[in-house]
Image (cartoon, grey):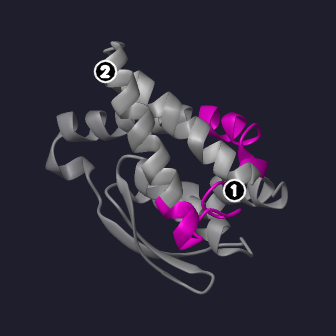
Amino acid sequence: MRYTISLSLGLVVFWLLNSGYYTPLILSLGAVSIVVVVYIVHRMNVVDHESQPLDLSGKILVYYVWLIKEIILANISVVKKIWLGKGSISPTLATITASQKTDMGKVIYANSITLTPGTVTISIDADRLIVHALISENIQSLKAGEMDRRVSKLEKLC
């Protein structure tokens, strides 16, 4: 039940932030659409701890702050390399070992790599991720393991 309430509150906030119109007609249409969506997903039995990871809610904010900082630094690095020209870019494909135990942890790790400019996770196979990097230093940074440790720490909090 708490996951259904969490989904409902999330949809209300999402609707209100994106709508921008607060007339009675728009609010009532929004309320009706939210009720229909919550009813459908509840009937489909897809509202659970995976679709609404409430345990991560507060703790993931610290990780997001760190990830945003990494994204900004990677953006700056990629822009510098592009400005310097073709000789400064060193595309690399490598296999990175993931220490996460759960599928959610591996997906968070893979998505975090992909969100960081200049790197893309191509595939996940068991505990190995194939990563393409625009700059070879990015692979070395991933192999150093800071992101892996942070995601593993986040995973243990679940």
Residue name at image x 36 percent, y 15 percent: 24
Q: Is residue 116 above or below residue 49?
A: above
* x then y, percent, for residue 124: 50, 79
| Dot in front, 1 or 2 | 2
Residue name at image x 40 percent, y 59 percent: 136
* x then y, percent, for residue 27: 39, 23
Q: Can the viewer see residue 113 in this picture?
A: yes
The residue to which callout 2 is attached is 25
Residue range in magenta is 40-67
Q: Quadrant of the C terminus?
A: bottom right
Question: Between disc 1 and disc 2, whose residue precedes?
Answer: 2
Residue name at image x 33 percent, y 12 percent: 23
Q: Image check: 117 left or right of 6?
A: left
Q: Can the viewer see residue 76 in this picture?
A: no
Q: Are marks 1 and 2 in contact (CB under 8 Å)?
A: no
Point out which mark residue 151 bears: 1
Residue furthest out toward the left: 86
Q: Is residue 34 above or below residue 31?
A: below
Q: Quadrant of the N terminus?
A: bottom right
Residue name at image x 62 percent, y 31 percent: 65
Q: Image check: 86 left or right of 18?
A: left
Give the quarter of the image for residue 58. top right
Q: Is label 2 in a helix, a strand or a loop? A: helix
Q: Is label 1 in a helix, a strand or a loop? A: helix
On whether residue 134 falls in the magenta region, the answer is no
Give the quarter of the image for residue 157. bottom right
Q: Amino acid at mark 2?
A: Leu
Q: Residues within 10 Å of mark 1 (few under 14, many from 20)?
A: many
Q: Amino acid at mark 1?
A: Val
* Separation of marks 1 and 2 at Cα, in angstroms: 44 Å
Q: Image check: 2 left or right of 120?
A: right
Give the quarter of the image for residue 81. top left
